[in-house]
Image (spheres, helix red, strand yellow):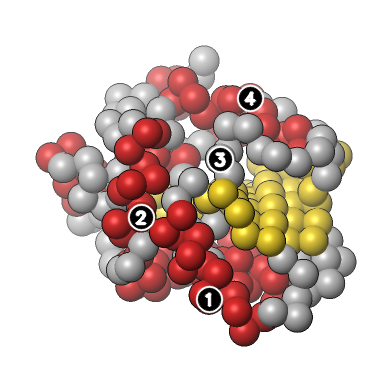
Amino acid sequence: MSFAIERDQKMDARVSQSEIPHLYNSLSKTYDIWGKLAESKARIRAIELADIHDGQQILEVAVGTGLAFMDIVKRNPTGVNIGIDISPGMLQKAQTRLRSLSAANYQLKLGNAFEIEAESQQFDLVLNSYMFDLIAFHEMDQILAEFRRVLKQEGKLVLVNMTTGETFGSGIYSLIYRISPKAFGGCRGVRLAKRIEQSGFQVETREYHQQLLFPSEVILALKM
């Protein structure tokens, strides 16, 4: 285990996976406000790095209210677009958002990252936003193995996570997490590039983005 991973493990997840569906059901009504104020810059950059072309097979894990999924489906209307989430409340919001794209090909359904209901080597792209910052360190490798399983060879993995702050003031969210882990949906800062490489991916880029002092990392990796 690398020093970077050991360092990141100083602040592990403090909200259990069993609590996440209920927590995000309650947040679903107001999540879009936060998503647009603090996460939109990183999310838009993730879509750019994904370089989506119509006709691809794409999976978004932790689709949330569909903020990214909407852009994915617009870019890939005749391809396969599947979005999964463990929160029925978030999925309901996503379904409402996607109604205007009823002619496009997409599915939204309950599912989790630990056991994805999909064939091996099915997808050209797996996108995942603001989920690993909820996951305990000892569970991350299992999820990355599932992502690798469902991706085609040289398929793309695009991740967006809350990360550790790199500028003055951005550490406020880590402080809040220590005091009240559920205050911002159970997220804490992580840095995943090293772990992704150790899971059989080649990291092409890792970028730091900040919005409303909220620090995010955007990672593009290829299955090798």
Q: Amino acid at mark 2?
A: Asn
Residue 103 x, y percent position in the rendering: 75, 80
Which of the labelled discs sits on residue 97, or is there none? Answer: 1
| x and y percentages locating residue 124 in the rendered image | 80, 51
Q: Is residue 64 left or right of residue 204?
A: left
Q: Amino acid at mark 3?
A: Asn
Q: Which residue is mark 2?
A: 25
- The crowding category of the residue bearing disc 4, from other C-alpha atoms within 10 Å (few below 14, some 14 to 19, many at least 20), is some
The label on residue 112 is 3
Tag 4's secondary structure? helix
Pointer 1 or 3: first along the chain: 1
Q: Earlier in the sequence, mark 1 or mark 4?
A: 1
Q: Can you give x and y, in whole percent of width and height, for residue 138 in the image? A: 46, 20
Q: CA distance from mark 1 to mark 4?
A: 36 Å
Q: CA distance from mark 4 to mark 3?
A: 22 Å
Of marks 4 and 2, the one in the foreground: 2
Name the residue rendered at 63%, 32% in the picture.
Answer: 115
For the point 62% across and 59% down, the residue is: 108
Left or right, 48 with respect to 29, comes to right
